[in-house]
Image (cartoon, rainbow, N blue to C red):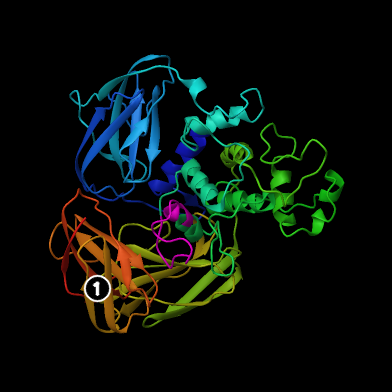
C-alpha cells in the first residue's frame, strides 16, 4: 500500500502530471551523463558494489529480483533501494521472495525512471545468493512490540537502512528526520538558494535539508537550522502536515478538536503547535493508521523528543494518509500581472494562502511544475505582489505568468505578458584562485552579491552552466573565499575555476588551476 502512495505520487510529480483544475504540466527528465555501470559481488553476505563511468545526477537505484532483468519502476516481483549519495558504491541486499538466487542491476536514476543500466549477464544482471538474515538486523529492537512492524515496513522501502543496531530510543535529529521524509516520498533534490550557515555542503544530510527548506516543509531558527537538535513531537506534527500539503498529497481541514479534553496535558489548546496537532489528529481520528497517539497514561507530551522507533510509525502512517488525498481548492478568482522590464507586479482578486509561483521562459506558456526551459521564483507570502526577474537563457524576450500556489501545483494563473530581460552585470573586477589539492581558496577584487560558483572537471575550461563532465558548488555568501573539492570521476588531475555568480549564469571567472583529487 505504501508503494502505491510513493509510486503514484512520484509518477505524477516527476513526469509532470500533477493536475490542478486549470493546468496540465509536463516534465522532461535530465539527460543521462553516465556511460557505463559495472556491478560485482564482494564475497560479503548479500553485498554488491558498482563502478560508474560518468556523472550521477540523482544517485542510483539498486534493483533485484528472482526474475532476470529487474528494473525501475519496478515490475511485480522486483524490489529496489534508492541510493542518493553518489559517493556510496555498495549495498547489502536481503531476500524478499524466499532464499535463493537473485538477479541484481544498478541504474542511473534520472527522476521517475532510470537512464543507464548495468549490463552484466547480457543485461539480466549479476547473480547473487541471498539468505535470510533478518534476526541479524535491529538487534536492539524488541520484535514483539507494536512499533517493530513499522520498522520492518520502513526498512523494506529503504526509508530506514537495515543495520545491526537501530538505537530505537535515541531522539531523532532534525537532519535525520529530513532524510527520512525525502526517502519516504522520493522527493527530488533541490539544493538551490542560500544554505544554512550550520549546514555546509559536506553535511551528511545537506541535500535533504535544502530540499525540504526549498519545498517549504522546514524552516530555520534565527537563521540556523540546528541539524543535530532533536525533533519534538509537536514539531513533528507540523513537519508531517507541511510535507503532505506542500507535496499536494493531502490538505488538512480546520479543526475545533478540544485537546485538553482528549489528553491530560494542560494548556494544549494554546500550545505553539496546537493548530497542527488538532488538524493531524482529526485527519486520522478513528483510523487504524493514526500518525500520532497519546501515551498509555493519557498524555500527549508534545514537548518530548520523538524517538527513532516512534518516527517509524509517524512516517509510515503519514504515507498512508497521503494515499487518501484531498483535492486542493484555491481562493483566488483572478491574477493580473503587468511589467515592462525586469520588474513585474500583479493584482490579486482573492487570497492565496501559500503565496505565488512566478514562472518565466523564452517559450510561451510557462508553468509550474516547470517544463524544460522554464524557471520559477516562489514567493510564500500571501501579500506578495512584485518580483524582479533575470535572463537565464540569454538576453531577449521572456514570457511571464504568476500563479496561485496550492502546494505541489498551481491553481489560478495570471494573464501572460512578455518582457525584455538582460543578463545581469556584476561588480567583480577579478578573482585569483590558488590551490593544489582538495582545499582551494581565492581572493576577489570587487563584490559578488550572489556569491560564487566553484566549477571543476577532468576537462579543461569548466564552466557554469555546466558541460557534461563538469561539477559545481554554489557558495551563496559574498564573503566566501575557500572550498573543499572531491573527486567525482575517479582520482587524478582536475581543472578548477571560480566565477562571480549572477543568477543563472556566471560573470567574471578566475584563473584556471589544476589540483590532484
253 sits to left or right of 246: right
Residue segment shown in magenta:
190-209
Looking at the image, the residue that sits furthest to the left is 460
Question: Looking at the image, can residue 191 be seen?
Answer: yes
> Badge 1: few (under 14), some or many (20 or more) residues near its Cα, within 10 Å?
some
Question: Looking at the image, can residue 465 be seen?
Answer: no
Image quadrant where residue 368 sits: bottom left
Could you say whether the residue bearing mark 1 is in a helix, strand or loop?
loop
Question: What is the quadrant of the C terminus in the image?
Answer: bottom left
Q: Which residue is mark 1?
A: 394
Inspect the magenta stretch and tell me whether residue 205 lies in it: yes
Q: Main secondary structure of the magenta part?
A: loop
Q: Residue 32 or 223: which is nearer the viewer? A: 223
**Residue 335, above or below 308:** below
Inspect the magenta stretch and tell me whether residue 147 lies in it: no
Residue 37 in picture, x, y percent from top left: 22, 37
Amino acid at each position: 500500500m505504501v508503494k502505491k502512495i510513493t509510486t503514484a505520487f512520484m509518477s505524477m510529480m516527476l513526469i509532470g502530471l500533477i493536475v490542478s483544475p486549470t493546468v496540465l504540466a509536463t516534465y522532461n527528465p535530465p539527460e543521462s551523463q553516465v556511460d557505463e555501470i559495472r556491478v560485482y559481488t564482494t564475497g560479503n553476505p548479500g553485498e554488491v558494489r558498482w563502478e560508474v563511468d560518468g556523472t550521477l545526477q540523482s544517485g542510483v537505484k539498486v534493483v533485484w529480483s528472482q526474475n532476470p532483468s529487474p528494473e525501475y519502476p519496478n515490475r511485480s516481483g522486483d524490489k529496489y533501494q534508492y541510493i542518493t549519495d553518489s559517493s556510496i558504491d555498495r549495498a547489502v541486499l536481503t531476500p524478499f521472495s524466499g532464499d535463493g538466487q537473485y538477479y541484481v542491476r544498478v541504474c542511473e536514476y534520472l527522476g521517475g525512471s532510470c537512464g543507464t543500466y548495468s549490463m552484466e549477464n547480457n543485461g539480466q544482471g549479476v547473480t547473487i545468493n541471498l539468505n535470510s538474515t533478518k534476526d541479524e538486523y535491529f538487534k536492539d529492537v524488541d520484535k514483539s512490540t507494536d512499533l517493530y512492524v513499522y520498522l520492518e515496513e520502513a526498512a523494506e522501502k529503504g526509508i530506514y537502512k537495515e543495520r545491526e543496531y537501530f538505537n530505537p530510543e535515541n531522539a531523532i535529529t532534525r537532519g535525520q528526520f529530513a532524510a527520512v521524509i525525502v526517502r519516504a516520498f522520493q522527493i527530488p533534490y533541490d539544493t538551490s538558494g542560500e544554505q544554512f550557515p550550520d549546514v555546509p555542503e559536506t553535511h551528511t544530510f545537506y541535500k535533504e535539508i535544502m530540499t525540504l527548506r526549498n519545498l517549504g516543509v522546514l524552516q530555520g531558527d534565527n537563521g540556523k537550522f540546528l541539524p543535530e537538535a532533536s525533533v519534538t513531537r509537536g514539531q513533528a506534527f507540523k513537519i508531517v502536515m507541511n510535507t503532505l500539503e506542500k507535496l499536494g498529497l493531502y490538505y488538512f481541514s480546520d479543526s475545533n478538536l478540544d485537546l485538553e479534553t482528549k489528553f491530560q496535558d494542560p494548556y494544549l489548546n494554546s500550545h505553539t503547535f496546537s493548530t497542527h496537532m488538532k488538524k493531524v489528529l482529526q485527519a486520522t481520528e478513528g483510523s487504524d493508521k493514526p500518525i500520532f497517539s497519546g501515551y498509555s497514561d493519557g498524555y500527549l507530551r508534545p514537548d518530548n523528543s520523538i524517538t527513532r522507533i516512534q518516527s517509524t510509525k509517524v512516517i509510515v502512517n503519514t504515507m498512508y494518509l497521503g494515499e487518501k488525498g484531498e483535492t486542493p481548492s484555491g481562493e483566488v478568482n483572478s491574477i493580473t500581472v503587468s511589467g515592462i522590464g525586469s520588474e513585474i507586479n500583479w493584482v490579486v482578486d482573492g487570497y492565496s494562502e501559500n503565496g505565488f509561483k512566478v514562472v518565466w521562459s523564452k517559450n510561451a506558456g510557462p508553468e509550474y511544475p516547470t517544463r524544460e526551459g522554464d524557471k520559477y521564483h516562489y514567493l510564500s507570502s500571501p501579500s506578495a505582489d512584485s518580483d524582479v526577474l533575470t535572463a537565464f537563457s540569454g538576453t531577449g524576450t521572456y514570457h511571464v505568468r504568476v500563479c496561485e500556489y496550492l502546494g505541489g501545483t498551481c491553481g489560478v494563473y495570471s494573464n501572460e505578458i512578455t518582457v525584455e530581460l538582460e543578463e545581469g552585470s556584476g561588480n567583480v573586477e577579478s578573482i585569483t584562485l590558488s590551490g593544489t589539492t582538495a582545499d582551494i581558496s581565492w581572493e576577489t577584487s570587487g563584490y559578488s552579491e550572489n556569491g560564487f560558483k566553484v566549477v571543476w572537471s577532468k576537462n579543461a575550461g569548466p564552466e557554469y552552466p555546466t558541460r557534461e563532465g563538469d561539477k559545481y558548488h554554489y557558495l551563496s555568501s559574498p564573503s566566501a573565499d575557500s572550498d573543499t573539492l572531491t573527486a567525482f570521476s575517479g582520482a587524478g588531475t582536475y581543472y578548477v575555476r571560480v566565477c562571480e555568480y549572477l543568477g543563472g549564469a556566471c560573470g567574471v571567472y578566475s584563473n584556471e588551476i589544476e589540483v590532484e583529487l
